[in-house]
């Protein structure tokens, strides 16, 4: 065998090894979700067979029916949707002008302010456990949607501002100056040039805020106790705390909770792939 | 001068609403927490008074605090090293292929956008001693003879939690390192291979030095998130068995909402905060150097 051929052979072997490794890693990543989905369609009797029956013989939607007929779960979904929407809207409304002011208007010290804002997203949520509790109880906001919104903003605002500022920085300054020459004021420039150019980035930031709020669990656990403001993740925790854990129902609820995240994921991926790992989720 | 000042004012005018909300929702609570850490609550008069270092002294003398200190250290070291090894392996694999790189990267990012509660529930279900699929697989393969209670014995529970948390977090390290790998010069890597270096030699001489900044970024980020953990342990073990998984976050939670000792909870959160601040400062130094 010539040297060339043996080299090609070896590189083909390496390729095969690398793809096998990636397929296995992907399988490990997908498996828990696959298992969740399989469980959610199983009737309860099949849970106790030994060895485990991986594929159900009697596929059923009864677990989903059980979850969707539970008024507590529906209330928690409504609360989650409400809180996440309000938090997303407020995060964008606050972070867009701020990012514009700090980057496009070249506010002196703007960079340091942004870095300060970014660092605050690394703060451990535990430093807010007690002060948030005292503040919320003083203003009678425990167990309310506005109380949760307040707590969630501390999570979404820093990362939203950072993401929007990063998009703004990529807009060529010439475009903005051209708009100004055409007689556009600040507000008009924002709407006509900056926002239009950075729409994908802003959409990503908004989706990110929504997903963060949708999945938020810590503050929801600490500051809600009744169906008035309890969000879906907390309700899952209560399903888990029941004496006889109904795993089928739990998995069906987990599937329903994960579904709304699939669509935003397609957008957010692009952001992550650029290696901006800072953007993150507290937990 | 005047122009500079208008610019200053205008720039911050736009930022004012955000800065006000951040002050109310982040800065003020953080300072309030600082105050509470040095205060004592008097339930009879419903008032706070300055207590000096009393809360910190209480922690210093508490075996439970030191337990959580030890557990947290193990948790951070375990998570960071496991995430680095797996993240690096997957990033190198992704970097060496061209076909299907996008789809593979997309799939491998799934854990990163998963909800913590859902991840916790998935792993409780997988680890379940009787109905769990992990025992089922291992039994079928003949690797174990009887079902293992993954979350019931102290060292095993900690290890099982670290595995679950690594599943959730390795994509962060992976994507950070993958970005760093784009800077590796293919010519240089090829040159070492022509010189007869094997893969390990190329990695040591070319790849590793180039991605070193990304490695430090990845390590620092995963350290921060490991310190900040809360949801996975509280849902999966509640800190047990025998407080073997009671990391700082859980200990602070218990101090605040089980014992209602707000002062001690605030003090403990400051101890955690200081540790994380050191890591953040290191992180910003690394980022700035890039």
Image: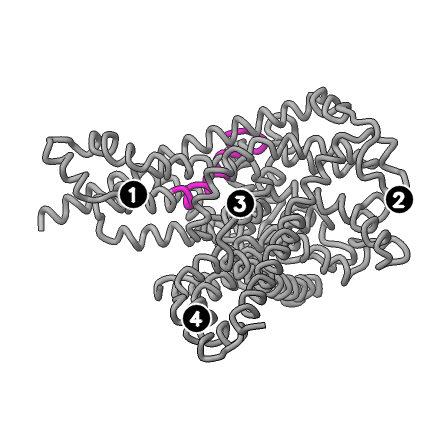
Residue A148 falls within the magenta-colored stretch: yes
Residue B265, horizontal then vertical, whole percent:
60, 54
Residue B128 falls within the magenta-colored stretch: no
Say which residue label 3 marks.
Answer: B103
Q: Earlier in the sequence, mark 4 or mark 3?
A: 3
- Mark 4 belongs to chain: B
Q: Residues within 10 Å of mark 3 (few under 14, many from 20)?
A: few
| Residues marked 4 and 1 touching at CB (< 8 Å) | no
User: Which span is picked out in magenta?
Assistant: A142-160
What secondary structure is marked by label 3?
A: helix
The residue positioned 42% from the left and 48% from the top of the image is: B27
What secondary structure is marked by label 4?
A: helix
| Residues marked 3 and 1 touching at CB (< 8 Å) | no
On residue A51, which mark appears? 2
Say which residue label 1 marks.
Answer: A168
Residue B31, horizontal then vertical, whole percent:
45, 52
């Amino acid at each position: 065998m010539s040297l060339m051929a043996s080299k090609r052979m070896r590189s083909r072997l390496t390729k095969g090894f690398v793809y096998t490794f990636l397929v296995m890693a992907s399988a490990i990543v997908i498996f828990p979700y696959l298992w969740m989905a399989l469980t959610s369609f199983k009737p309860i009797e099949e849970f106790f067979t030994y060895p485990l029956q991986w594929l159900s013989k009697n596929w059923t939607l009864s677990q989903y029916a059980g979850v969707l007929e539970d008024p507590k779960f529906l209330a928690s979904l409504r609360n989650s949707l409400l809180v996440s929407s309000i938090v997303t809207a407020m995060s964008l409304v606050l972070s867009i002008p701020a990012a514009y002011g700090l980057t496009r208007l070249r506010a002196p010290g703007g960079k340091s302010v942004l870095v300060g804002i970014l660092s605050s997203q690394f703060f451990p949520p535990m430093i807010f456990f007690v002060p948030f509790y005292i503040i919320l109880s003083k203003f009678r906001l425990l167990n309310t949607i506005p109380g949760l919104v307040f707590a969630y903003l501390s999570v979404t605002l820093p990362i939203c501002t950072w993401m929007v500022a990063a998009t703004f920085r990529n807009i060529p300054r010439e475009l903005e100056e051209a708009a100004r020459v055409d007689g556009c004021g600040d507000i008009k420039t924002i709407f006509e040039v900056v926002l239009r150019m950075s729409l994908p980035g802003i959409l990503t930031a908004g989706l990110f805020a929504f997903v963060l709020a949708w999945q938020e669990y810590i503050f929801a656990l600490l500051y809600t106790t009744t169906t008035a403001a309890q969000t879906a993740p907390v309700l899952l925790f209560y399903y888990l705390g029941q004496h006889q854990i109904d795993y089928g129902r739990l998995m069906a609820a987990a599937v329903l909770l994960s579904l709304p995240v699939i669509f935003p994921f397609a957008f957010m991926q692009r952001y992550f792939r650029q290696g901006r790992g800072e953007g993150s989720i507290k937990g | 001068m005047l122009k500079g000042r208008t610019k200053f004012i205008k720039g911050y005018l736009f930022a004012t609403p955000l800065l006000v909300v951040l002050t109310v929702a982040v800065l003020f609570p953080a300072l309030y927490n600082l105050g509470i850490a040095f205060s004592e609550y008097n339930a009879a008069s419903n008032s706070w008074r300055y207590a000096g270092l009393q809360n910190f002294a209480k922690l210093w003398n508490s075996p439970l605090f030191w337990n959580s200190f030890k557990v947290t250290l193990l948790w951070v070291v375990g998570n960071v090293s496991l995430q680095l090894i797996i993240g690096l392996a997957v990033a190198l694999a992704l970097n060496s292929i061209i076909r299907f790189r996008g789809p593979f990267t997309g799939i491998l990012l799934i854990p990163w956008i998963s909800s913590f509660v859902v991840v916790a529930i998935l792993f409780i279900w997988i680890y379940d001693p009787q109905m769990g699929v992990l025992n089922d697989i291992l039994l079928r393969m003949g690797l174990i003879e009887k079902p293992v209670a993954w979350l019931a014995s102290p060292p095993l529970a900690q290890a099982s939690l670290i595995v679950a948390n690594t599943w959730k977090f390795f994509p962060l390290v992976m994507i950070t390192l993958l970005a760093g790998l784009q800077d590796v010069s293919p010519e240089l890597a090829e040159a070492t291979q022509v010189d007869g270096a094997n893969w390990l030699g190329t990695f040591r001489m070319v790849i590793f030095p180039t991605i070193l900044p990304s490695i430090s970024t990845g390590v620092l980020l995963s350290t921060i998130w490991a310190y900040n953990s809360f949801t996975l342990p509280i849902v999966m073990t509640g800190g047990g068995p025998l407080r073997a998984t009671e990391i700082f976050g859980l200990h602070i939670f218990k101090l605040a909402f089980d014992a209602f000792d707000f002062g001690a909870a605030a003090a403990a959160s400051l101890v955690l905060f200081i540790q994380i601040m050191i890591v953040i400062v290191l992180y910003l130094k690394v980022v700035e150097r890039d």
